[in-house]
Amino acid sequence: MDTETSAPRSDIAASLAAVRARIATALAAAGRPAESVTLVAVSKTQPPGQIAAAIAAGQRVFGENRVQEAKAKFPGLKARHPGIELRLIGRLQSNKAADAVALFDVIETIDSEKLARAVAAAMARLGRRPRCLVQVNTGGEAQKAGVAPDQTGALVALCRDELGLPVEGLMCIPPVDADPAPHFRQLAALARSLGLAVLSMGMSADYPVAIEAGATHVRVGTAIFGARPAP
């Protein structure tokens, strides 16, 4: 059922304004140009009405963690609101590669040769080429997705040179109990060494720190939408 009319638009609009102001302050403090960071509104578990409220407040870039959830929400929203960009920021299984290629404008979580090959095959089959990021596991966490930092160059080379994927940058999620700054600096240095311009890093708790380290995209959910509803 369409729930667009039930969203608390004023609350979300105010939260978006506060996040944008904080981004502007962080950019100024870092000596970076205004508008050099893209805000990705993380809309996982949010109903279409909440997302529509953000769209009404001027937000155009959204991040979703799960392919199936995004398939249930975004085709209708994108049809009604042209110009929306949808980014996959959660782990992608190879068997969902075709669905992801069909729906998303950016896939941020390429992290293995198997997945890269599945995405490349889906692109060739569907004739659609969403932009890609390689996810790096900067914390070396066994439970977390992402390629090891010392294997990132090889994966990027495979994606770009052999598979022809449109890789434009790197993404990371630092360990929750660690100082994120070293992780962000590591990702920025790795991207520079590989000639990649896009850095997706920083979430609600630490996006100003990520901006100081060079983030081009910050993924913010709770600070915009509030606590997530139960799935």
Image (cartoon, grey):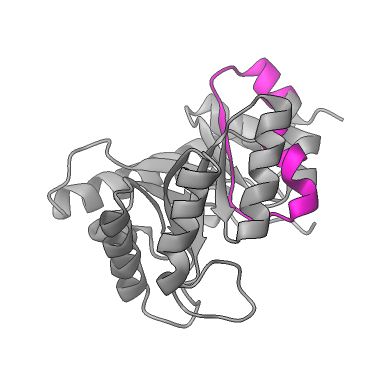
Please give the name of the residue rendered at 51% of the width and 30% of the height, measured from the top-left corner: 60
Q: Quadrant of residue 17?
A: top left
Residue 33: image x %, image y %? Answer: 17, 39
Relative horizontal placement of residue 124, taking residue 140 as reference (left or right) = right
Instruction: Residue lying at the far right in this picture: please name it.
Output: 1
Q: Does residue 227 appear in this view?
A: no
- Please give the range of residues in magenta: 76-102
Please give the name of the residue rendered at 65% of the width and 49% of the height, measured from the top-left corner: 117
Residue 230: image x %, image y %? Answer: 78, 59
Relative horizontal placement of residue 25, taking residue 81 as reference (left or right) = left
Relative horizontal placement of residue 231, taking residue 151 as reference (left or right) = right
Please give the name of the residue rendered at 32% of the width and 42% of the height, measured from the top-left corner: 37
Residue 54: image x %, image y %? Answer: 55, 34
Please give the name of the residue rendered at 38% of the width and 40% of the height, measured from the top-left corner: 38
Depicted 160 relative to depicted 222: above or below: above
**68 or 15: nearer the viewer:** 68
Q: Which quarter of the image is occupied by the C terminus?
A: bottom right
Q: Is residue 86 magenta?
A: yes
**160 or 60: nearer the viewer:** 160
Q: Is residue 186 magenta?
A: no
**19 or 6: nearer the viewer:** 19
Instruction: Residue lying at the far front in this picture: please name it.
Output: 162
Relative horizontal placement of residue 121, taking residue 219 as reference (left or right) = right
